[in-house]
Image: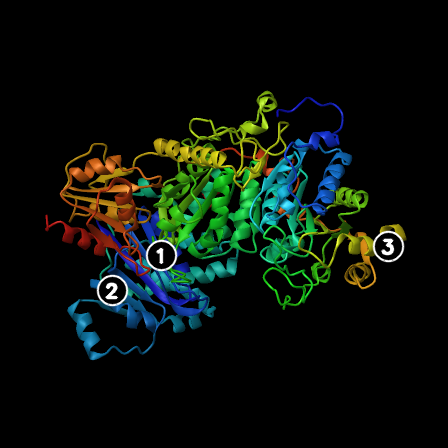
Amino acid sequence: MKRISLKITGAQGQGVNSVGEMCAKGLKRAGYCVFGYREYMSLIKGGHSSYQLDVSNDKVESTEQLVDILVCFNHHGLEKNVQEVKPGGVVLHQTPDWQWSAQQLKDLRKRRITVLELPTDSIVTKLKAKPIIANVLITSVVWSLLGQKEEALKALVQEQFGHKKDLLELNYRCVEEGFAFRATHMAVASVMLPAADKKRWKDALLVTGSHAMGLGLVHAGVRFYAGYPMTPSSPLLTFIAEIQNETGMIIKQAEDEITAAQIVSGAMHMGTRAVTATSGGGFDLMTETVSMNGIIENPSVIILAQRPGPGTGLPTWTAQGDLFLAIFGGHGEFARCVMSVADAQDSFDLMPEAFNLAEEFQTPVIVLTDKQIAEALWTQQPWNQKKAKLRRGKLVTEARQLAKLKSADRYDPTVKDGVSSRWLPGSKAATYVAQADEHSADGSVDETDENARLQMEKRMRKQVALRKQLPEPELFVGGKAAWLTPSLDLLLVGWGSSKSVVLDALSSPDLKGKRVGYLHYSYLWPLKTELFGKLAKKSKRVAVVEGNNMAQLAQLIRMECGIRIDASILKYDGRPFFYDELKQEILNLLPKI
Amino acid sequence: MSIKLQTSGPSMKDYHCENKCTWCDGCGDYGIWTAVKRALVESGIHPYEALLCYDVGCNSNMSDKLLGYRFHGLHGRVLPFAAGAKLANPKIPVMAFGGDGASFSEGIGHFVHTVRSNYPIIFVLHNNANYGLTTGQASSLTWQGQKMNTAPNGMPEQTLNSMDFVFSLEPTFVARGFSGNIKQLAQIFKAALKHRGFAFVDVLQACPTYNKFATHDYLLEKCVDVNAEGHDTSNLALARQAAIDVSKRIATGILYQREDIPHFYERLVPRQGLKTAAVDEVKIHDITKMMGRFV
C-alpha cells in the first residue's frame, strides 16, 4: 500500500482547516481514501496549528510523522515543522524574504527537499481580492503538486462559491494563478499519488468521529440531547444542535455536567432515548448520577470523550486515560457496561447497541471515545442501516400487560437475571418509586439487612447476565479480521483509537507477512477474557497498545483472569500513535522473540 | 398492588400508601403531604398520571408515603431530573420537591437555570430554614446568629434573602404557603399545576426538633393570605416587595404570576407542530438524507 501525506501549518484562524478540508474533499472525490488529523491549541487566534492529510487508494486511517508536502502559512511552520518533511519532499510557504540558516540549507540539500515560495500577497493584490482568498490559491498549488486536474478543483470551488457569482470568478482566477505558479516551477516533481480507486472511494463520506456519532445517535432513536461544552465532546453537541431542525430532537445546553446528566436521566426514566457527552472533568461531575442510575436501575448512556488529564490537562489533545474512570467512577457497587468506539464506523454502529444494552439491563452504559476519533476526518463508506434493531428489554407498554403489574414487580429481587419489569410514568398501571435509597421491591425505602443483600445481589446479577451477552473481543491478523485462534509471534491487545493505527501498521509492507495479531476490545466492562486467554497461551509475546501511562487495559485483564501482560506500547503525550512510529515499536518487539 | 379499573375521578384513597410516616411530631411535612394529595385529587389527576420527583431530605422521605409514579434521587439535583422527565413527555404533570438546605446550597445553580429556562414544572420548596435530616445544621436560609448543630456559637454567615433572590430571576409564578394552612396550600398547588411555565411554591413549615426560631406558632401568627386582600399578582415589583417584607407579617398565597411567556418546550423550534412527545419517537431512524452533506 502506497500512502502519501501533506501537512498544512499556520496560526489558528488563518485558514489551515479550510485548505485541509478542501483538499480532503477533492482527493476523496478523485478516488482516494483520506485521513485528516488536526493539531491545535486551546486558544482561538494565533498559536500554531496543523491539519494533516494522509492519502492512499487503499484504506488509510492513521497519521505519519513524516510528510511529503509541508505547507506553511507563516514562518512558525518553517521553524518548527521542516524536520518533518520526508527526503525528496516539498515545502510550500508564503513568507517573503525568509532566510534559512546555513545549517538548515545544508540539511535541506542533504534531504533533497524543494522549497517553493508562493508570492501570495502580490497575487492577491493583483486580483484585488481579500486576503482570505489565499486559501484557494494555496489549495490550488497543493492540488497541482499532487498532479491533480484543474477542472476538479474548479468544480469544488463552484460548489462552495457558486451562489455568489463575482466571488466565484475571483476564486476561479485563484485556481488558475495557482496552476500558473506551478507551471513556472516545472522542475519540481509532483508528489506521486497511487492510481485512484474511484469506484471504491468517490461515494464514501468524509466525516469526523463526532459527525459519525451524532448520526449514530439519531439512528439509535435518541430524541433528547443535553450537554455542557467541553473539548473534545463539544463538536458532537454542536453537530447535534446544527441538525436539530431536521431531526426534531430536543437540545438543551445545560448549566453544568451534573445538570446534563440529571436531565438525560429524567428523560430516560420517562421513556425516551436521551444522551449526554462530556470529557473526563465533566464525567467526574456526573459520577454521582451514574451511581444513582445504578440503584434506580435507570437505563442511561453517557459518552466520555477522552483528553489528557489530570486536571484541565491538555484540552485539545488526545488520550486513552479514562478507562478506569469509566469503569470505576461512581460510589458503591452496581452493574454497568463500558464500551469504546475505535473509528467512524464504530461511532455510528455502537450507538444503537449502547442504548439497547442500557434498556435491556436497565443500567448505565458509558461509551468511550477520544479527541483523535472525535475530531479526525475519516473516509467512511455509508453505514449499513439495516443492522441495528431496536431492543428495549423488559419494558412493558401493552395495556393488558400493564394492568397485571404490581408495584413490587419493579424491583422484584427474585428475577433470575436480575432484570425486572420496567414501565414508564404515565402508564395506566400500579405505581412505584424509582428509589435511590436502598429499597424494597416497590421502591419503598427499606434499610433491613436482608433486603439490602437481596437488592444488591439482584442488581449485580445483571452484570453476570450482561457479561454473558457481550461479544468477545475481535481478532485481526495481517490487518484483517480472523476467525481462528492461530499461533502468533506477537499478540497486540488494545481498545479505542489504537485500532485503526495498529491495523494500518499491520497492513504495511514491513509487517504484512509477520505472525502478529491484534485483539481489539470494544466492550471493556464487564471484561471478557476467554478468547484473550486462549490466544495468549498460543502467542510468544503479548503487548498492549494504549494511550495512557498505566497500561490500564493490561491491569484490567490481569485483574479479571490473572494473566500478566509484560510488554506494552504506551503513549501519554497528548498525541495519537503515529503510523511510522508505531510500526517501528511493533518491529522492536518482534526481534526479541 | 395492581391497579383497579376506574371510571370515576381519583380520590384521596387512591394516593394512600401503607408505609408509616417517619417525620417528627408536629413536622410541617404532614401538612404539605396532605395538601399535595388533595391538590392532585381535586385536579382530577390519578396517581398513574403524574410524576412526583423528590430531592433528599426530610421532605423527600415523602417519596414512599403516597402513591403515584415517584422518583427519589440525589441531594440538590431534583430540578434537572424533573425537567428532563417533563420535556421527554410534556403530557405528564411533574412536581418536584426539595428542602431549603439542598435547594439553596448544592442545588442553587439548578434553581437559577430552572427559573430562567421556565420549564413547565412545579417546584415545592419545603422551607424549614435548616437541614433537618442531617440533624439540624444551618442552611443558607437559617437566621444569622442562630446556634445550630455545626455552629454552636451562632451561624456567622448572612442569611440569604430567598424571595428577593427568586424575584431577581424574573420567575413566572411565585407563591408562598404555610404547612399549617392545608386548604390554602392545596389551592396554591392546584394553581401551580395549571400554570403555563415554571411554578415556584415556597412552603414555610415548622421543624419542631431543630428550628427554634420560626416555629409553628410564629408562622401561624404571622402568615396572612394576601389573595383574600385582593393582592395584584401581575405586578412584579409589588409582589417582590410583599414577599420580602416579613417584618410585621408574612404574605402568603399566589404572589406573582404571568402566563404570557412561553415555557421552554414551547420555544423549541424543532418541536413546533409535533403531536408526539420524545417518548413516542423511540425507533431506529433513517439517516440517509443526513448523510448527503458529507459526500
In the displayed structure, A235 sits above or below A180; it is above
Residue closest to the eye, A313 or A188: A313
Respond whether the residues carrying marks 1 and 2 are from the same subunit. Answer: yes
Residue closest to the eye, A516 or A312: A312
Residue located at (47% from left, 68% from top)? A130
> Residue B124: x percent and y percent?
69, 48
In which image quadrant can residue A182 be found? bottom left
- Tell me the element at label 1: loop
- Label 3 sits on residue: B231
Spatial CA span between label 1 and label 2: 20 Å
Residue closest to the eye, A249 or A34: A249
Mark 1 against mark 2, which lies toward the viewer? Answer: 1
Residue closest to the eye, A317 or A271: A271
Residue A84's tag is: 2
- Do residues under tags 1 and 2 come within 8 Å of each other at their CB atoms? no
Chain of the residue that carries numbered disc 2 in the rendered image: A
Residue B18, visible in the rendered structure: yes
- Tell me the element at label 3: loop
Q: Amino acid at mark 3?
A: His
